Amino acid sequence: MSPPTGAIALHGLTLGYDRHPAVHHLDGTIQPGALLALVGPNGAGKSTLLKGIVGEVPCLDGRIDRSGRADAIAYLPQSAEIDRGFPLRVLDLVAMGLWHRIGPWRRAAPYRDTLVEALSAVGLVGFEDRPIGTLSGGQFQRALFARLIVQDARIILLDEPFTGVDGRTSADLLRLIGAWHRQGRTVVAALHDLTQVRSHFPQTLLLAREPVAWGPTDAVLTADNLARAQALSEAWDEDAAICGRSAGGVADAHPHAHPHTHAHPHSHGQARDHAHRDAP
């Protein structure tokens, strides 16, 4: 059965590169209308998970069930992955959000009012003809959020959306994310600032290549869970091979894959209790 519209179901998910896992043994459902933060140490797999959801990183094991049409998901990568040297006007950048609606060859001119309205929503009125290379970091991020507005997706994935932007821009964009949540859209954001997470995101998934905890933010961001995530991250073997599975479909024991001194949080104990609170 397909998940309900706006939901993303993860089933025994392992994602990675060249058969080496970067995120593994992840089960659960991101419910329709969720406002979910992805947190964890550097290299915990947050960006990999988002890229896996949009199909940019292959599933090495398990699967992802995405509901709705292909254009139901809007994805904003980290700003460092976006080439700002391309000679493009701000209005043209925002118009890229119309691609699924009008196709690659139709002119966006008839939609100018829609584009300007999106720029107004992010505080960039009058920036339509500015080259994107002249924008500050905060202005560029606002323009990218305007593109998300135009895309009008039911699921919005954000990878470190506040890195390198000023506090005012962060506050404005957080208000926009809150508005999306109130509209019933599903928003998942990879974040570092735990104060932001506690203040604005009711649900959190704590990753350390493995799921450490998943559920209400206050229950997830405990000192014990954060310490466990740090320990797992430090003990990770970058050259680990993908874990095998038994004939019954259950993951085999795999001390060869990522030796560390802690029990797997998805095998026993506290973190697994949290990890499935959102699962159906």
Image (cartoon, rainbow, N blue to C red):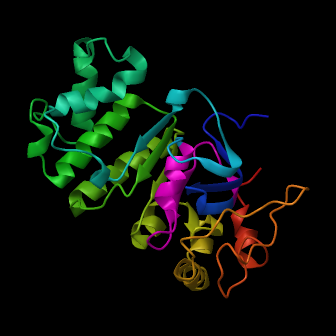
**Going 71% across and 38% down the picture, which residue do you hit?**
3
Number of dots carrying numbers: 0
Q: Position of residue 46 (x, y in %)?
A: 50, 60
Q: Name the side, left or right, on which 224 lies relative to 247.
A: left
Q: Position of residue 239 (x, y in %)?
A: 56, 70
- Quarter holding the N terminus is top right
Q: Nearer the viewer, residue 49 or 15?
A: 15
Q: Position of residue 158 (x, y in %)?
A: 42, 50
Residue 232: image quadrant is bottom right
Magenta segment boundaries in residue numbering = 26-53
Q: Name the side, left or right, on which 158 lies relative to 169.
A: right
Work out whether 107 lies above or below 169. above
**Going 87% across and 60% down the picture, which residue do you hit?**
246
Q: Nearer the viewer, residue 10 or 248?
A: 248
Q: Residue furthest bottom?
A: 261
Q: Name the side, left or right, on which 225 lies relative to 265.
A: left
**Going 52% across and 63% down the picture, which residue do you hit?**
45
Q: Nearer the viewer, residue 136 or 171?
A: 136
Work out whether 162 lies above or below 228. above
Q: Is residue 43 magenta?
A: yes
Q: Residue furthest right?
A: 248
Q: Is residue 252 magenta?
A: no
Residue 8: image quadrant is top right
Q: Position of residue 267 (x, y in %)?
A: 78, 73
